[in-house]
Amino acid sequence: MKKEDIPFKELHLLMLPDTGRTLMIDDDLVLVDNIGTSLDTDPMSDFVSATYPFKLTFALTMFCLRGFMRVRLNLKEYTLAENDVLVVLPGSIGECLEISADVELVVIGLSDHRLVGGKEAAMSMAMLKFFTSTSLMHISQADMDESINLYRLMRAKVEQPGYSFKLEAATGYLQVLFYNAYQWITDYNRQQVQRVESRQQQLFEAFLELVQAHYAEQRSMSFYAGKLCLTPKYLSQVILEVSDRHATDWIRDYVILDAKALLKSGRYTVQQVGDLLNFSNASFFGKYFKAVVGCTPRKYMLGL
């Protein structure tokens, strides 16, 4: 295959643009900030070109302070905007589609993943799993401010004349950023669980309202699932998870409770009660009632 036929080119750490604010540390770490915004003159122009995609051979993290950048990563489109963090894993195929004139980014390129998270395998795997599914995360203003402060401290230490432990110091700051990112993911996942639980609780309450309104005519899960625009299987799972009882048990209990009240009212026969609750015949009603209560409707009505 000819070079010009290759569908994407590899982007190596050393290929990150020199904007005048680019720091390279031992070929392992690149720090870039205040990237220029003109695609015609900026050294980033080749990197953000929409002409062809690129394949990263290193990990890339972008913090967006203002403006926006629209990218496509592994066929998914993301818009990096204020207080967003974009994490691109090695091996990702990306393409910059659009960048605003006022964009302000802080970029950290890392060629050796062992510099951070090496001793925390479980954390590293959790972060790998998260950023494999999505590259973009929105963080609070306070978290962004802290991240940029850490970046500035790291940069200042690396730029310190005569300092002999630049990579070691940078690794320390990167480790803090790593722990912070893990905390963001943990908090995000917890919020997602709470949203799911809240949504399930809402579905359960909506289901009970429907049952209370329709139990006399409808005892089919398909009816209630249809009303909630869900499948019967999923609705049944939600009700069981929230209430520790099967959905059909809730429907049955409403039916039986009403049947008991009607039978004890003294105003209806067993046949009439079965009709009121939309049973096809008295025999079917009797079997349904006895299976739950343990006696026939007539015996229950007479207190036998």
Image (cartoon, helix red, strand yellow):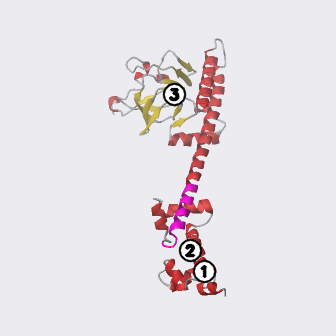
| CA distance for labels 1 and 3 | 70 Å
Q: Amino acid at mark 1?
A: Ser
Magenta part mainly helix, strand or loop? helix
Q: Provide the secondary structure element on which disc 2 rests.
A: helix
| Image disc number at residue 279 | none
| Image disc number at residue 255 | 2
In the rendered image, which quarter contains the C terminus? Answer: bottom right
| Badge 2 density bin: few <14, some 14–19, many ≥20, Cα 10 Å | many
Q: Amino acid at mark 2?
A: Val
Q: Nearer the viewer, residue 191 or 268?
A: 268
**85 above or below 101?**
below
| CA distance for labels 2 and 1 | 15 Å
Q: Provide the secondary structure element on which disc 3 rests.
A: strand
| Badge 1 density bin: few <14, some 14–19, many ≥20, Cα 10 Å | few
In the rendered image, which quarter contains the N terminus? Answer: top left
Residue furthest out toward the top: 161
Q: Which residue is mark 1?
A: 265
Asked if the stretch drawn in magenta spans residue 37, the answer is: no
| Badge 3 density bin: few <14, some 14–19, many ≥20, Cα 10 Å | many
**208 above or below 2?**
below
- Name the side, left or right, on which 175 lies relative to 106: right
Which sits earlier in the primary sequence, circle 2 or circle 1?
2
Which sits earlier in the primary sequence, circle 3 or circle 2?
3
Percent position (x, y) of residue 217?
48, 73
Stretch in magenta: 201-217
Q: Provide the secondary structure element on which disc 1 rests.
A: loop
Percent position (x, y) of residue 67?
47, 26
